Image (cartoon, rainbow, N blue to C red):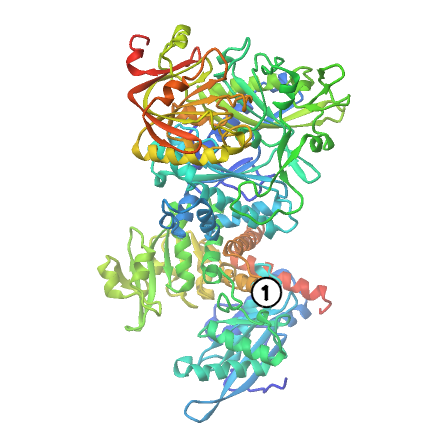
Amino acid sequence: MSCAKTIAADLPAFDRRFWDGTFRFTRIGSGALGGKASGLAFIKDFLAERFDAEAFPNVEVNVPVMAVIATDCFDEFLELNHLRERITPETSDTQIGMVFQQANLPVELLGDLRALIQQVTTPLAIRSSSLLEDALGRPFAGVYATKMIPNNQPEADVRFRRLVEAIKFVYASTFFREARDYLCTTGSSPDSEKMAVIIQEVVGQRHKDRFYPQLSGVARSLNFYPTGEARPEDGVVTLALGLGKTIVDGGVAWTYSPSHPKAPPPFGSVDELLGGTQTDFWAVNMGKPPAYDPVNEVEYMVQADLAAAENDETLELLASTYDPERDRVIASLGVRGPRLLNFAPLLVREELPLNAVIENLLRVAEEAAAARVEMEFAITFDRNHDQSLRMRVGFLQVRPMVVSDEQVEVTIEDLMRPDALVASNKTIGNGIAEVEDVVFVRPERFSVTDTQVIARELERINNTLREEGRPYLLIGFGRWGSSHPSLGIPVDWSQISGAKAIVEATLPQINVELSQGSHFFHNLSSFRTSYFMVRHGGQFGINWQWLNEQPLLAETDFVRHVRTAKPLMIKVDGRTMRGIVVLSDNTQGSK
Amino acid sequence: MPHSTVTEPAAKTESSSTVEPSRKTKALNSFQIAQAQFDKVAEYLNLDSATRDLLRYPLREFQFAIPVHMDDGTIKIFRGFRVQHNDARGPGKGGIRFHPQETIDTVRALSMWMTWKCSVVDIPLGGAKGGVICDPHNLSAREQEQICRGWVRQVAMNVGPITDVPAPDIMTNAQHMIWMLDEFERIHGGRLPGFITGKPVGLGGSLGRTEATGYGLVFTLREALRELGMKAEDTRASVQGFGNVARYAIELYLRLGGKVIAVSCWDQEDQCSYTYRNTNGIKLEELLSVTDRFGGINRAKAAALGYEVLPGNAWIEQDVEILIPAAIENQITGENVGLISKAVKIIVEGANGPTTPEADEKIRERNIWLIPDFLANAGGVTCSYFEQVQSNMNYFWEKDEVLSKLDVKMTAAYYAVSELAKREKMYMRDAAYAIAISRVAKACHDRGWV
């Protein structure tokens, strides 16, 4: 966040005491802190000042203890080991990861790391904090790596090695293909990027071999998909059990409007509800060491299901139970039946003022950023001496949302136009763009078993169009970027980064709850990429016939690439969330 | 192992315990200086007489003959030493010097200083030192190998991974250590890489050893700057010496943001030293590019690069905040101590004994923050300790791990000394001695020796 921009010199130096040092937020090195760390450095004082602690007596909010390795250490690491020279466009991510693992960290920071690790034996998150993220005012969500380490080994030597490996991995991720592609789309050179690294305590509690927060969340102060009574400016909150990776990866989580916390998402039936809520979660693996794989981001992470969470006694405030006999959902675990992660004890029964706290935090963060914001948090619950419930909120990230302010109008009549190639009343973004290329997944060939192949085919076409500098309209089925291939096409952003507009559609064979752009939300808003949601059989749709009549440039098993004779105009009205794609000539006068 | 009691050419030692730590040190040899330093601190610590008697002298001394069949067919007898000053805190540790002017008293003094050095950085080792009276310049590699193997044969039963661990020192190197290790293993059977340190990486050596002394010096300097409220980027330094210690110290100090404006270096051709100055700050890579394989800076090339070439002693009179004597002993003397600029706030002793007692007194009077040699340059022995630990396990650490441990050790040692100095209003050198000696004395007490 530009207003929160700060430099490392403003922070106290790490005094080799992590937990009981004079300061909870310190730096190692003397360079910049990067976007994420700068945002947190800024917000921590704001939070202390502005969060209404008196209104929430059983709630504790803070930024978890952290030490930031400033960007000068990154520069020195690259220079000392001649790493920039060793990376070519052909070098694979794995090769980059291994080269970085073999390199030596600058000696200046080793003593501090050693001192830190000697006194910390709980899990640590090693997080990227990119300089360009700050400088460009662009969120680089999910572009660079974060690595969790259990840090529970009895020997300091082992903990130190794992920490060093994780730092080198985060450094290496600066040069991974996805990051390089992303930088290209921002018009920045990979050489201009610098990486700070945040070493931060992981918010959570240990439950046998797992360590996780009971609840992770992302809250945005602007909602592009309000449902029911909610308005865009009410914002939107997504909650998940366990680590936030579930949300960041676009997995199944609970999304609601903070102005209507008791209103469930629009599921058609209990079956849909059961199928559309979270069933597994991420945790840090505190148990048996996994196979050694320092270039794997999830090396020390583990997934578990709701039964495991119930065993850990972490569902009490989060889950309801479906009572099949009465065909109703009960906001409690007191009865037998399938557990349903709808956070009703908190949102409906209000056993703790979760939603009020989130609303308050959103307001504070908006004030701090002077912009619409997105924030990430993690929460644990425990009990006071008098057995009353207590909630500890770890504030993990805050960043401004990039929102276009171009005035575009798309009326309901526009959506009904017969010449509309794509029309939707559920879009993300705002503005007008032109493309001549359309890349679409062939509906007649689509199958959920082939989504990984489709991802690779799309990547090839994307790379070609990117090299040619041709933005395009992308149409596909299921949840874009889902980590579950059965729910949609599991692409990462770099595989579709050249798209100017993305259509997420359903088919009878993949009639899932759509992602609503959640996985790529920040990429979309950052690159002004529009997003259309189209459900099959709905009021508005896609003109497949017209598409298939366009001149074919490439065709694979599952994907077709066509180029239109005249440019297509993509229009999205951010206020009404209506959007259309029409031939350019036909749109005159509708602005 | 029978050993000779050669008294020549080793000098006799004054054994009087009434040697006064006065300024008349010119008349004293190294061992007497070491004893005088000890006496002073023993008095401060109020050590009992038995402990003083124990620590004023080495626990054990080995003096022996090493017959060598020379390349010309003759047989020559070389004199060898190993002195184990004290091993109450752990196996002895100390180098082996090849030097034509070697004396038993020098070796005694050095072994005592090793005891204090290991103690001040709190590594579980005692102090020892060895040597052979010889000049390697005049010996073939085969002859040197015979000396190494002969030296080991004479003390093989009294040294080893759990008793006394040698290392390279003046005019000995990794090759000598490998010959010695090989002979030791031949005598004892098996592979015992923990017998000796300073081995090459890949053959039992430790990563980070080359940088350890210079980096260790800067770790202590970094903390001193922090304590004095100074920022490295606001400081300048002048360095005497351009050997291994100086180079790595310069490298790290520059990386911390400091500026080195002068470096003095021995010129083999002219048989004198010169100071190379650039008031805008020297560039290490640039100077290294005009350095010969013996470590000497080429005067003409340095001048061509824009460096001022000044007399060798000019390094001491520069207007800098930091002086780093990292060449040889007795370089800051009563004669030149007055030349030290008023700007100087810190002296970090990279060399062993670079400051004479007279100069030391002046430095103390001027309240210059001094980081004494056996603390500042203890990075080397600390890393040797790491090498020995790794060798004993036959499991070797990454460089990151070695240097991180070194930093933590050196920083902790620095603060132990500086906190005592501040608390008791002591001179840093005295505080370092007080800590080192009290730890050794305690170990002797705990073992029931005294």
Residue at screen point 63% across, 84% down: B1
- Asked if residue B370 can be seen in this view, the reply is yes
Identify the element where label 1 is drawn: loop
Figure check: A180 above or below A479: below
Q: Quadrant of residue A176?
A: top left
Give the x, y percent position of residue B100.
44, 81
Front-most of residues A98 and A509: A509
Q: Residues within 10 Å of mark 1 (few under 14, many from 20)?
A: some
Q: How many marks?
A: 1
Judge from the rendering whether residue A153 lies leftward or rightward of residue A1; answer left or right: right
Quickly name the residue at label 1. Answer: B394
Q: In which quadrant will I find the C terminus of chain A? A: top left
Q: Is residue A306 above or below residue A353?
A: below
Tell me, yes or no, if residue B12 can be seen here.
no
| Residue A235 position within the rendered picture, expressed as x and y whole percent measured from the top left | 52, 16
Q: Mark 1, chain letter?
A: B
At which x and y percent is residue A171? 45, 43
Label 1 is placed on what type of residue?
Asn
**Left or right of residue B235: residue A237:** right
Residue situated furthest left in the rendering = B304
Q: Is residue A154 left or right of residue A430?
A: right
Q: Residue at x 58, y 53 (%)?
A: B416
The answer to whether residue B71 is left or right of residue A328 is: left
Which of the two residues, A123 or B226, is positioned nearer the viewer here?
A123
Relative height, residue A213 to residue A591 (above, below): below
Identify the image quadrant of residue A173: top left
The residue lying furthest to the bottom in this view is B74
Q: Nearer the viewer, residue A66 or A426?
A: A426
**Between A534 and B57, which is closer to the camera in this rendering?**
A534
Residue A323 in the image: state x and y as whole percent: 74, 18
Q: Is residue B118 above or below residue A265?
A: below
